[in-house]
Amino acid sequence: MNTFVLPVNGTYAQDQSVTVFTSCLWQTTSTVVETPERVFVFDPAYFPHEIEAVATFVSSIRKGRPVVLVLTHGDWDHIAGFSAFADATVVAQEQILADGRLQEQLGKVLSFDEQYYVERKQACLLPRIDRTIDADEHDDLWGVRFLSVPGHTGDMMATLFVEQKLLVMGDMLSNLEFPFINDSIGYTDSLAKIERLVEGGDIQLLIPGHGAPAGADETLDRIRHDQAYIEEGRQIVREGRQSGWSKEETKAKFLYMTYREQPIAKGISSMHEGNFEVFWDEDVLSK
Protein backbone atom coordinates (compact mmCIF):
# COMPACT_ATOMS: atom_id res chain seq x y z
CA MET A 1 0.00 0.00 0.00
CA ASN A 2 1.35 3.40 -0.92
CA THR A 3 2.30 5.94 1.70
CA PHE A 4 0.00 8.93 2.11
CA VAL A 5 1.46 12.39 1.59
CA LEU A 6 0.52 15.65 3.25
CA PRO A 7 -3.02 16.85 2.60
CA VAL A 8 -3.73 18.86 -0.52
CA ASN A 9 -6.94 20.89 -0.30
CA GLY A 10 -8.03 18.77 2.63
CA THR A 11 -7.60 15.41 0.87
CA TYR A 12 -4.79 12.94 1.34
CA ALA A 13 -3.23 11.52 -1.80
CA GLN A 14 -4.88 8.22 -2.56
CA ASP A 15 -3.61 4.82 -3.57
CA GLN A 16 -5.73 2.52 -5.70
CA SER A 17 -8.37 1.88 -3.06
CA VAL A 18 -8.17 4.39 -0.20
CA THR A 19 -8.94 8.10 0.00
CA VAL A 20 -8.93 10.17 3.18
CA PHE A 21 -10.72 13.52 3.33
CA THR A 22 -9.77 15.85 6.18
CA SER A 23 -12.19 18.34 7.72
CA CYS A 24 -11.24 21.82 8.87
CA LEU A 25 -12.84 20.86 12.20
CA TRP A 26 -10.27 19.04 14.34
CA GLN A 27 -8.79 17.46 11.19
CA THR A 28 -11.59 14.90 11.40
CA THR A 29 -11.04 12.20 8.78
CA SER A 30 -13.63 10.83 6.38
CA THR A 31 -12.26 7.68 4.79
CA VAL A 32 -13.42 5.97 1.61
CA VAL A 33 -12.22 2.42 0.94
CA GLU A 34 -12.99 0.62 -2.30
CA THR A 35 -13.19 -3.15 -2.64
CA PRO A 36 -14.26 -4.98 -5.81
CA GLU A 37 -17.78 -5.51 -4.45
CA ARG A 38 -18.40 -2.49 -2.18
CA VAL A 39 -17.52 1.07 -1.29
CA PHE A 40 -17.01 1.73 2.42
CA VAL A 41 -17.42 5.22 3.84
CA PHE A 42 -16.31 6.10 7.39
CA ASP A 43 -17.56 9.04 9.46
CA PRO A 44 -18.29 11.63 6.73
CA ALA A 45 -17.64 15.01 8.36
CA TYR A 46 -18.21 17.78 9.09
CA PHE A 47 -19.16 20.96 7.27
CA PRO A 48 -21.70 20.76 4.42
CA HIS A 49 -19.20 21.37 1.61
CA GLU A 50 -16.88 18.74 3.09
CA ILE A 51 -19.60 16.11 3.31
CA GLU A 52 -20.73 17.00 -0.20
CA ALA A 53 -17.18 16.46 -1.48
CA VAL A 54 -17.12 12.98 0.04
CA ALA A 55 -20.56 12.14 -1.37
CA THR A 56 -19.64 13.43 -4.84
CA PHE A 57 -16.45 11.39 -4.82
CA VAL A 58 -18.30 8.24 -3.77
CA SER A 59 -20.85 8.76 -6.55
CA SER A 60 -18.05 9.12 -9.09
CA ILE A 61 -16.39 5.81 -8.16
CA ARG A 62 -19.40 3.76 -7.10
CA LYS A 63 -20.18 2.12 -10.47
CA GLY A 64 -23.25 0.36 -9.15
CA ARG A 65 -21.59 -1.06 -6.07
CA PRO A 66 -23.43 -0.94 -2.74
CA VAL A 67 -22.20 1.58 -0.19
CA VAL A 68 -21.49 0.65 3.43
CA LEU A 69 -21.43 3.53 5.90
CA VAL A 70 -19.43 2.67 9.02
CA LEU A 71 -19.72 4.85 12.10
CA THR A 72 -16.60 4.29 14.18
CA HIS A 73 -18.51 5.59 17.22
CA GLY A 74 -21.41 7.85 18.05
CA ASP A 75 -19.73 11.15 18.93
CA TRP A 76 -21.37 14.13 17.25
CA ASP A 77 -18.53 15.10 14.93
CA HIS A 78 -18.59 11.59 13.45
CA ILE A 79 -22.32 11.23 12.76
CA ALA A 80 -23.13 14.55 11.08
CA GLY A 81 -22.80 13.19 7.54
CA PHE A 82 -25.30 10.34 7.80
CA SER A 83 -27.99 12.16 5.82
CA ALA A 84 -25.80 12.26 2.69
CA PHE A 85 -25.55 8.45 2.73
CA ALA A 86 -29.03 7.50 3.88
CA ASP A 87 -29.27 4.81 1.17
CA ALA A 88 -26.16 3.03 2.47
CA THR A 89 -26.05 0.03 4.77
CA VAL A 90 -25.08 1.57 8.12
CA VAL A 91 -22.85 -0.42 10.48
CA ALA A 92 -21.84 0.46 14.04
CA GLN A 93 -20.94 -1.11 17.37
CA GLU A 94 -24.07 -2.10 19.26
CA GLN A 95 -23.50 0.26 22.20
CA ILE A 96 -24.13 3.19 19.87
CA LEU A 97 -27.81 2.35 20.42
CA ALA A 98 -27.62 2.90 24.18
CA ASP A 99 -30.62 4.87 25.39
CA GLY A 100 -30.45 8.44 24.18
CA ARG A 101 -26.84 8.33 22.94
CA LEU A 102 -27.46 9.22 19.30
CA GLN A 103 -30.23 11.65 20.18
CA GLU A 104 -27.90 13.52 22.54
CA GLN A 105 -25.09 13.62 19.99
CA LEU A 106 -27.38 14.81 17.21
CA GLY A 107 -28.41 17.60 19.56
CA LYS A 108 -24.75 18.63 19.79
CA VAL A 109 -24.54 18.81 15.99
CA LEU A 110 -27.57 21.08 15.89
CA SER A 111 -26.22 23.21 18.75
CA PHE A 112 -22.82 23.63 17.08
CA ASP A 113 -24.43 24.54 13.77
CA GLU A 114 -26.65 27.08 15.48
CA GLN A 115 -23.78 28.66 17.40
CA TYR A 116 -21.52 28.99 14.35
CA TYR A 117 -24.23 29.72 11.77
CA VAL A 118 -23.63 26.53 9.80
CA GLU A 119 -26.34 26.18 7.16
CA ARG A 120 -27.10 22.82 5.62
CA LYS A 121 -29.19 22.17 2.53
CA GLN A 122 -29.76 18.67 3.84
CA ALA A 123 -30.93 18.44 7.44
CA CYS A 124 -28.91 16.28 9.82
CA LEU A 125 -30.94 13.20 10.63
CA LEU A 126 -30.69 10.70 13.45
CA PRO A 127 -28.53 7.88 12.06
CA ARG A 128 -30.33 4.66 11.20
CA ILE A 129 -28.27 1.62 12.19
CA ASP A 130 -28.83 -1.40 9.95
CA ARG A 131 -26.24 -3.76 11.38
CA THR A 132 -24.73 -3.80 14.85
CA ILE A 133 -21.47 -5.43 15.88
CA ASP A 134 -21.07 -6.82 19.39
CA ALA A 135 -17.66 -8.38 19.96
CA ASP A 136 -14.94 -8.74 17.33
CA GLU A 137 -16.42 -10.09 14.13
CA HIS A 138 -14.78 -11.40 10.96
CA ASP A 139 -16.89 -10.87 7.84
CA ASP A 140 -15.42 -13.06 5.10
CA LEU A 141 -17.92 -11.84 2.51
CA TRP A 142 -16.91 -8.22 3.01
CA GLY A 143 -13.24 -9.02 3.63
CA VAL A 144 -13.11 -7.10 6.91
CA ARG A 145 -12.70 -7.64 10.62
CA PHE A 146 -14.72 -5.43 12.93
CA LEU A 147 -12.82 -4.85 16.17
CA SER A 148 -14.33 -3.59 19.40
CA VAL A 149 -11.92 -0.97 20.75
CA PRO A 150 -13.47 0.67 23.82
CA GLY A 151 -11.66 3.24 25.90
CA HIS A 152 -12.40 6.56 24.22
CA THR A 153 -16.07 5.62 24.14
CA GLY A 154 -17.77 2.33 24.91
CA ASP A 155 -19.13 2.09 21.37
CA MET A 156 -15.93 2.54 19.37
CA MET A 157 -15.19 0.08 16.60
CA ALA A 158 -12.21 -0.20 14.27
CA THR A 159 -12.39 -1.87 10.86
CA LEU A 160 -9.52 -3.94 9.48
CA PHE A 161 -9.44 -4.56 5.74
CA VAL A 162 -7.67 -7.88 5.74
CA GLU A 163 -6.24 -7.94 2.22
CA GLN A 164 -5.17 -4.30 2.25
CA LYS A 165 -3.79 -4.54 5.81
CA LEU A 166 -5.56 -1.26 6.46
CA LEU A 167 -7.13 -0.28 9.79
CA VAL A 168 -9.67 2.55 10.03
CA MET A 169 -9.37 3.29 13.71
CA GLY A 170 -11.74 5.94 15.03
CA ASP A 171 -10.67 8.26 17.84
CA MET A 172 -7.46 6.62 18.97
CA LEU A 173 -3.82 6.84 17.88
CA SER A 174 -3.98 10.33 16.43
CA ASN A 175 -0.80 12.31 15.87
CA LEU A 176 -2.68 15.35 17.21
CA GLU A 177 -4.03 14.08 20.52
CA PHE A 178 -3.07 12.35 23.72
CA PRO A 179 -5.66 9.70 24.69
CA PHE A 180 -9.12 11.09 25.43
CA ILE A 181 -10.36 8.46 27.87
CA ASN A 182 -13.63 7.30 29.35
CA ASP A 183 -12.29 3.89 30.49
CA SER A 184 -8.54 3.47 30.90
CA ILE A 185 -8.66 -0.32 31.26
CA GLY A 186 -10.60 -0.61 28.02
CA TYR A 187 -8.23 1.86 26.42
CA THR A 188 -5.08 -0.05 27.35
CA ASP A 189 -6.67 -3.33 26.24
CA SER A 190 -7.56 -1.75 22.89
CA LEU A 191 -4.02 -0.42 22.45
CA ALA A 192 -2.64 -3.88 23.19
CA LYS A 193 -5.00 -5.42 20.64
CA ILE A 194 -3.83 -3.08 17.89
CA GLU A 195 -0.19 -3.53 18.94
CA ARG A 196 -0.48 -7.30 18.49
CA LEU A 197 -1.99 -6.89 15.03
CA VAL A 198 0.72 -4.49 13.91
CA GLU A 199 3.52 -6.66 15.28
CA GLY A 200 1.92 -9.68 13.60
CA GLY A 201 2.03 -7.94 10.22
CA ASP A 202 -1.75 -7.59 9.92
CA ILE A 203 -1.72 -3.76 9.82
CA GLN A 204 0.49 -1.71 7.51
CA LEU A 205 -1.54 1.49 7.46
CA LEU A 206 -3.70 3.04 10.18
CA ILE A 207 -6.13 5.91 9.65
CA PRO A 208 -7.16 7.68 12.86
CA GLY A 209 -10.35 9.67 13.36
CA HIS A 210 -8.35 12.91 13.50
CA GLY A 211 -5.04 13.75 11.88
CA ALA A 212 -2.58 11.94 9.68
CA PRO A 213 -2.45 8.26 8.67
CA ALA A 214 0.42 6.17 10.03
CA GLY A 215 2.45 3.25 8.77
CA ALA A 216 3.30 0.30 10.98
CA ASP A 217 6.35 1.82 12.68
CA GLU A 218 4.60 5.13 13.35
CA THR A 219 1.55 3.28 14.69
CA LEU A 220 3.72 1.40 17.19
CA ASP A 221 5.35 4.68 18.21
CA ARG A 222 1.94 6.25 18.84
CA ILE A 223 0.82 3.20 20.82
CA ARG A 224 3.84 3.37 23.09
CA HIS A 225 3.46 7.08 23.77
CA ASP A 226 -0.21 6.55 24.61
CA GLN A 227 0.61 3.62 26.89
CA ALA A 228 3.22 5.75 28.66
CA TYR A 229 0.74 8.61 29.14
CA ILE A 230 -1.84 6.30 30.68
CA GLU A 231 0.66 4.59 32.96
CA GLU A 232 2.10 7.91 34.16
CA GLY A 233 -1.38 9.28 34.86
CA ARG A 234 -2.36 6.20 36.82
CA GLN A 235 0.90 6.32 38.76
CA ILE A 236 0.41 9.95 39.79
CA VAL A 237 -3.08 9.18 41.08
CA ARG A 238 -1.90 6.03 42.84
CA GLU A 239 1.00 7.81 44.55
CA GLY A 240 -1.20 10.73 45.53
CA ARG A 241 -3.75 8.55 47.23
CA GLN A 242 -1.09 6.42 48.93
CA SER A 243 0.62 9.59 50.21
CA GLY A 244 -2.61 10.96 51.60
CA TRP A 245 -2.80 13.90 49.20
CA SER A 246 -6.17 15.48 48.61
CA LYS A 247 -7.82 15.12 45.25
CA GLU A 248 -6.96 18.72 44.37
CA GLU A 249 -3.31 18.26 45.38
CA THR A 250 -3.09 15.14 43.23
CA LYS A 251 -4.77 16.90 40.34
CA ALA A 252 -2.30 19.78 40.53
CA LYS A 253 0.58 17.36 39.96
CA PHE A 254 -1.35 15.53 37.23
CA LEU A 255 -1.85 18.76 35.30
CA TYR A 256 1.92 19.18 35.00
CA MET A 257 2.18 16.00 32.95
CA THR A 258 3.58 16.18 29.45
CA TYR A 259 2.82 14.16 26.34
CA ARG A 260 5.62 13.31 23.91
CA GLU A 261 7.80 15.53 26.10
CA GLN A 262 5.62 18.54 25.32
CA PRO A 263 3.24 20.43 27.64
CA ILE A 264 -0.44 19.63 27.25
CA ALA A 265 -1.87 22.13 24.75
CA LYS A 266 -4.18 24.65 26.42
CA GLY A 267 -6.88 24.16 23.81
CA ILE A 268 -7.39 20.53 24.81
CA SER A 269 -6.37 20.76 28.47
CA SER A 270 -9.97 20.09 29.49
CA MET A 271 -9.62 16.59 28.04
CA HIS A 272 -6.51 16.05 30.18
CA GLU A 273 -8.48 17.18 33.23
CA GLY A 274 -11.23 14.78 32.24
CA ASN A 275 -8.70 11.96 32.12
CA PHE A 276 -7.69 12.80 35.69
CA GLU A 277 -11.29 12.34 36.81
CA VAL A 278 -11.38 8.94 35.08
CA PHE A 279 -8.12 7.80 36.68
CA TRP A 280 -9.20 9.08 40.10
CA ASP A 281 -12.58 7.35 39.98
CA GLU A 282 -11.05 4.11 38.73
CA ASP A 283 -8.48 4.13 41.53
CA VAL A 284 -11.20 4.74 44.12
CA LEU A 285 -13.29 1.88 42.76
CA SER A 286 -10.31 -0.48 42.75
CA LYS A 287 -9.89 -0.22 46.54
Image (cartoon, rainbow, N blue to C red):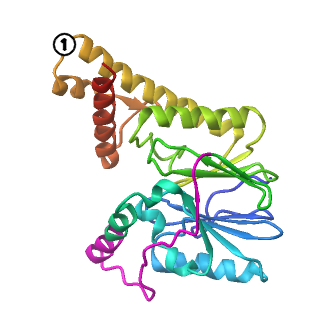
User: Residue 131, relative to residue 268: is it above or below?
Assistant: below
Q: What x and y, as percent, mark residue 173?
A: 55, 43
Pointer 1 local density, CA inside 10 Å: few below 14, some 14–19, many at least 20: few
Q: Residue at x 44, y 48 (%)?
A: 153
Q: What x and y, as percent, mark residue 70?
A: 60, 64
Q: Is residue 255 left or right of residue 87?
A: left
Tell me where residue 179 sits by quadrant: top left
Q: Is residue 109 magenta?
A: yes
Q: What x and y, as percent, mark residue 92?
A: 55, 60
Residues 73 and 218: in front is 73
Magenta region, main secondary structure? loop
The region drawn magenta spans: 108-135
- Label 1 residue SS: loop
Tag 1 residue = 244
Say if residue 156 shows up in the picture.
yes
Q: What x and y, as percent, mark residue 80?
A: 45, 71
Residues 282 and 3: in front is 282
Q: Is residue 53 magenta?
A: no
Q: Is residue 75 left or right of residue 128?
A: left
Q: Residue at x 30, y 22 (%)?
A: 237
Residues 262 and 40: in front is 40
